[in-house]
Image: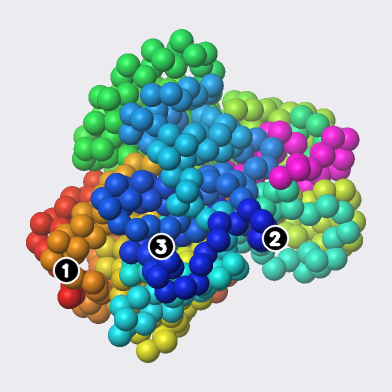
Amino acid sequence: MIEESAVDEETAVDIDSTEASSAYDVVIIGAGFNGLYQLYRLRAEGFRVRLLEAAPGPGGVWYSNSYPGARVDSHIPNYEFSMEEVWRDWNWSERFPGAEELRDYFAHVVEALDLGDDISYDTRVRGAVFDDDARRWTVTTDVGDVQCRFLVPCLGFASKAFTPDLEGLDTFAGARHHTAHWPSAGVDLSGKRVGVIGTGASGVQVVQEAAKVAEHLVVFQRTPVTALPMEQRSYDRDQHEELKASYPELFRKRNSPPGSFADMDRLDVSALAVSEQERNAVFEAAWRKGGFHFWAATFSDILLNEASNRTAYDFWRDKTRARISDPVTAEALAPTEPPYPFGTKRPSLEQDYYDVFEQDNVELADLRKHPITRITPTSVETQGGSHELDVLIMATGFDANTGGILAIDLHGLDGVPLSQRWADGVDTHLGMAVPGLPNLILLYGPQSPTAFCNGPTCAELQGEWVVELLVRMRERQLTRIEATEEAATAWTEHVEEVGAYTLFPLADSWYMGSNVPGKKRQMLNYPMSDGYLARLRTNAANDYQGFVLD
Ligand code: N01
């Protein structure tokens, strides 16, 4: 996650603008999982690599999303690198680690892999221009320009926060913070009147913490989240060492098809092909395991067939409503009829989210009944009344998948900006390259599995395709790669076709780009990570079909 920060000329690693010292083989943008993996592997292959990171340290989203309660929703060991030199000396304290522990983990990764000297922190990339004659990108940063043959943005899917254009928002005179730009010094919510707009993953987490300390907390909900039990667990050192005995086998499985989660498998059977009793037994078992099991590891067609999906929704609804005593609140948080097919907006994980609405200091403002009309210096006003607040927390998400890359002013052939090419929607070949922008390789970007493939897994599997590509180009003394128009059109159509086979297009979500007004509605995440990785392998075996290499 890249946050605006003053450039510290003292600590920023100098980027010398002289030709000899600034021409890298590869410049990577972003020090999250993808960027660090690329740096580690490309450097091992002998490439001259520089990683530029806007934040003062590594960690990507975990650097600036430091709001109270921020923690990962993918359980370890899925959410960590598989390299033994990283995990050997690292012990987690929890099954779902918090943001602070994750930041410590990233610092450990940098140290264990000895990456520090090749990273420039406090270095925000503003733009880049491709020179086709020299076959080189010139990358502009806050602290100078740098040149490279290949540019590899590793921005994650959530590096640009989204704030809705609510009337009067800028007039709010209390403290106002987006969860993705949380002040590193923290924000004191104790004894305050706090409002949270948004009930996605960030909203759920911050609500759980704010409810503990706020004098009064108002949760402004437009669409209910289908939050699932986290089943958090603490580990002491011995327990974690014991768990590590299974790491080699778990990582071997994670890095083989279908990939992603090492210890979660979907049944190869429809939810409608079994009796109600058998179905509920499968749901109950997944529920008890916690985490994403109930979303990603029950029946084969939960996200494909509306009738199957409805059985999962009803199970979730009944479990959730059993925890909420007030019938009006229960209907708002877990409606009788699904507001969207279960799982087509990302479920969050919760520990006591539904319980906090039992507290006297917590109020739910149902924006479907009473939309926000405006923000005043002291309040959020809805059609149902006025809520006086000291602190307003915007948990309103991200301009996901495309916002981060478009925030960089990229110019390809003939100076054409990427923003112009994507003005009517995204197109890529394999989610990794865009015609007209040679030698630009996207990782974890739009039209890749991205949000359906957990970060470190994709960083390693998708990342290896890039490493192999660059090694093979070097062997053949090739210096330029560009996706063809035909390949990008075909991939974009294919992503839409596969998306249409699922239930995802039935919801308004950031998966579809439809959480940001005016953004084209299209499938931005390729929903089959196993099929995708197989395609990558075939593409490499077939000498990079759909790309022109010379
Ligand atoms: O963002 P979101 P997020 N008026 O887009 C509401 C990852 N992540 O930051 O649904 C009122 O999910 C919006 O309402 P609606 C994870 O992949 C991971 O929570 O559009 N409300 C919604 O409730 C996650 O899925 C972790 O009707 C408005 C909320 O704001 C992704 O990031 C932690 C509004 C936005 O929810 C995004 O999560 C955090 C308006 N005008 C994030 N505009 C972990 O792993 C928007 N909303 C733990």
**Marked residue nearer the N-terminal end (3 or 2):** 2
Q: Earlier in the sequence, mark 1 or mark 2?
A: 2
Q: Earlier in the sequence, mark 3 or mark 1?
A: 3
Eyeballing the image, is 416 above or below 143? below
Confirm or deny contact between disc 3 and disc 1 (CB under 8 A).
no
The mark closer to the camera, 1 or 2, is 1
Whether residue 280 is visible here, answered yes or no, is: no
Say which amino acid is labelled 3.
Answer: Val
Mark 3 closeness class: few <14, some 14–19, many ≥20 residues within 10 Å: many
Image coords of residue 485 (percent x, y): 25, 79
Seen in the picture, residue 21 relative to 256 is either above or below; the reply is below
Q: Is residue 394 left or right of residue 310?
A: right
Which image quarter holds the C terminus? Answer: bottom left
Residue 227: name its quadrant: top right
Q: Which residue is mark 1?
A: 477
Residue 6, numbered label: 2
Q: How is the image coloured?
A: rainbow
Tell me, yes or no, whether the highlighted magenta stretch contains residue 166.
no
Instruction: Report whether residue 188 is seen.
Output: yes
Q: Marks 3/2: CA distance?
A: 22 Å
Please state the horizontal and vertical placement of residue 175, each as a whole percent of the image. Answer: 83, 52
Q: Residue at x 68, y 42 (%)?
A: 67
Instruction: Give the amino acid at mark 2.
Output: Ala
Q: Does 451 sit left or right of 268 as displayed?
A: right
Q: Residue at x 39, y 28 (%)?
A: 87
The residue where tag 3 is placed is 27
Q: Which segment did they paint magenta? A: 184-210
Task: Farthest residue to the left: give it.
Answer: 542
